[in-house]
Image (cartoon, helix red, strand yellow):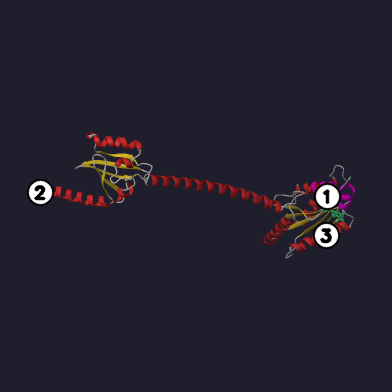
Amino acid sequence: MIILSSFSDALDRQTATLARWLLDSDTVFALLLAPDGAIRFRNLAANRIFPHNSAGVDEPKIWDFLNESDAEPFRLRLSDPAAQTGGPFHLNLSEGSKNPVTVEVGLVGCEGGFLLVGAIEERNALRLQAERQMLTNQLAAMARELARKEKELEAANHVIERIARTDLLTGLANRRALDEMLSREMARANRQHQPLTLILADIDHFKLINDTYGYGVGDQVLVTLGRVFGSQVRPYDVAARLDGEKFALVFPGTACSEGVAIAERLRKQVGAVHIPDGPERISVSFGVATLTERESGEDFLARTDSVLSKAKNSGRNRVEADGVGVLQN
Ligand code: GH3
Ligand code: MG
């Protein structure tokens, strides 16, 4: 018995505490409704959701705040003793309300009327969540698009890089690519004490070819010889077109005698080239040199060029090597 009464006391105290909390709640609304639906009392949250004057009457009725479709069923609910209490169920507030939302409510019969307690469904929160999700998806799509563009840009940069290092007429490396490769290979050759051989090739009497057959045929000669020189290099060698009708071929790990053999092979291949509507015979002069210790790239090129001049001065269509003259004709 003592236990029961202290339980009932505790319950009373708890109910009083709950009632006080409900009175001041800003999140859970509570309304005291008369049987005819008139709002007799509002707590703090209800004041916000069912404001005094929004219905334009002194004592608005609860259905003044409801969607038309909800008003009549709710009126019936209040008048039907069997359905008077219960919940939770949903009510949709009318469009004019400050918060056009759905509320989840419970209805309790009490002395002289009803207590309607509820909370706003977090539709805004759901909407925000949906918007956040949409934004996240958009950001993810943008990130994917950015990654795709970056890849495209990277590919375009590679193309630009390649073009910047390519002689556009022959497709061989250009002077810039040659300089870069030569300084890299010279450093490696010095480090590893490996030979590095350079061949310079210059078309004989090219001006005459241009003058006689036209610039177009001259170009065709350059393209064809570019193909011949390009076909003779391994992946780690380089064939480049320098200015005009001069070509350079770099052979890492290759001794001077091997370079001479390569140049000789090239000389013969050029001799067999036939250009439609072009000269009967094309010839090229070659200068071959192997890198000496502590030689700069510029000096190496200049020395090889002077070997090439020797080949020119000695009658053309021949291979000259640094220190070793190899007479051809
Ligand atoms: P050598 O035997 O002494 O090398 O004489 P060459 O006539 O070959 O040399 P020269 O330096 O007198 O003439 C080179 C010519 O190459 C002159 C120039 O008009 C021509 N040339 C330079 N670049 C190009 C090009 O891209 N296309 C064509 N068709 N001709 C070019
Ligand atoms: Mg020439």
Residue at the (88%, 58%) spot, across then down: 313
Amino acid found under the numbered disc labelled 3: Val
Front in this rendered view, residue 32 or 319: 32
Q: In which quarter of the image is residue 130?
A: top left
Kindly identify which residue carries mark 2.
Answer: 2
Q: Nearer the viewer, mark 3 or mark 2?
A: 2
Residue at 22% over, 35% down: 81
Amino acid type at circle 1 is Arg
Q: Is residue 21 left or right of residue 233?
A: left
N-term-proximal mark, 3 vs 2: 2
Q: Which residues lie in the magenta part? A: 205-223
Q: Where is residue 24 in the image (x, y as percent from the top left)?
A: 27, 52
Foreground of the two, 107 or 235: 107
Q: Position of residue 270 (x, y in %)?
A: 83, 47
Going by the numbered disc 2, the residue's amino acid type is Ile
Disc 2 packing (10 Å; few <14; some 14–19; many ≥20): few
Q: Is mark 3 on a helix, strand or loop?
A: helix
Q: What element carries label 1?
A: helix
Of the numbered discs 1 and 2, the one sitting upstream in the chain is 2
Residue 267: assigned label: 1
Q: How far, Cα to Cα, is label 3 from label 2? A: 122 Å
Ligand 1 closer than 8 Å to label 2 CB = no
**Relative to residue 141, is residue 287 drawn left or right?**
right
- The residue at which mark 3 appears reads as 307
